[in-house]
Amino acid sequence: MGEQRNIHTQGIILKKHPFGENDFSVTIYSPDLGKIQATAKGARKMTSSAAGYLETLNICNFQLYKSSVRYTIVQCQIQEKFKTIGEDLDRAMMAGMIVEIFNKSTISSEHCSELFHLLRQSLRKIGKTSQHFLTVESFKLNLLRQIGVLPDLENCASCHERWNTGHIIWLEKSGYLRCENCLYEHAVSEQNGHSRNTKNAKHIEFNIIKLINYLIRPLSEQTKTIAFNPEQKEQLQYLTRFFLEHFLDREIVSEKMMMDISG
């Protein structure tokens, strides 16, 4: 039986850019197909009715035609449009960061309904709540967990003892969390018996680990209003940014720009 040519699917528009004289190339994430590139023929013409539908963040129902070399958008109907995000600069910047992270962290052959639902839920939460920072951090952690690169955050990477208030926790440049004793032992081993030091590690508060374990829960279950000081906020952001850049080898440009603006 031949491969299906006409496809109906739902998808979130991650980005678009001009293609040729009259077309757009649209990046779509579908729970059925994963991340795909699709051509919207004639969408750049002033008379095209599709131009208003093909906006970043829109969730649409697509009718696609698949040839041997590309997908072509035959029809597009908006299912969900995040109006409140477009009307607020802070929300728009946070949503843009989420989409950039998602686009850089997923691969074309990877398709997973859980990733689609995570992105949709995160955008909905940004549109409805005021805790934008925590929504973004929760999104990062859950994305890393779902694609299988988030390290063990509940136990020491060496002795596997579960974290408690008595531990001094360190994040190593290798990307793993170790207690102080294991960190020193590991450092001595790496340095062939030289003196103990923590210059290549960052101290992480136990309360940040507790917060991370809360944020890894499904977004629908995160109902608390959480207050934390600037140092704790910096630690949480440092951890999630470190994991993204270390395990995915990706720099998040929009986040760096936001930090430069706020800093």
Image (cartoon, helix red, strand yellow):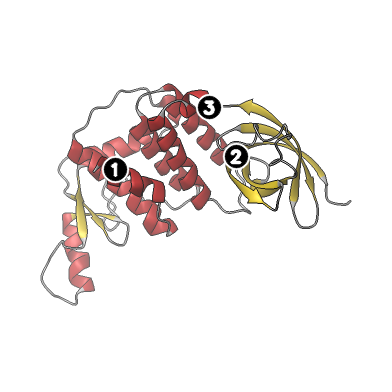
In-front residue for pair 181/220: 220
Is 218 rendered above or below residue 259? above
Q: Residues within 10 Å of mark 2 (few under 14, many from 20)?
A: many
- Give me the C-alpha separation between circle 2 and circle 1: 27 Å
- Give me the C-alpha separation between circle 1 and circle 3: 25 Å
- Give the amino acid type for the residue marked by disc 2 in the picture: Ile
**Foreground disc of the pair 2, 1:** 1
In-front residue for pair 185/54: 54
- Give the amino acid type for the residue marked by disc 1 in the picture: Ile
Residue 259 % position (x, y): 29, 45
Residue in the image at 24% along x and 38% along y: 233
Q: Could you tell whether 83 is left or right of 63 in the image?
A: left
Residue sitting farthest toward the front: 46
Residue holding disc 2 = 13
- Give me the C-alpha separation between circle 3 and circle 2: 12 Å
First in sequence: mark 3 vs mark 2: 2
Residue in the image at 16% along x and 58% along y: 181
Residue in the image at 10% along x and 71% along y: 195
- Give the amino acid type for the residue marked by disc 3 in the picture: Phe
Query: SS class of the residue under badge 1?
Result: helix
Please indicate, yes or no, whether residue 163 appears anywhere in the rendered image: no
Residue holding disc 3 = 82
Residue 236 % position (x, y): 28, 42
Residue in the image at 16% along x and 49% along y: 168
Query: SS class of the residue under badge 3?
Result: loop
Query: SS class of the residue under badge 2?
Result: strand
Is 45 rendered above or below residue 251? above
Residue holding disc 1 = 261
Q: Residues within 10 Å of mark 1 (few under 14, many from 20)?
A: few
Please indicate, yes or no, whether residue 87 appears anywhere in the rendered image: yes
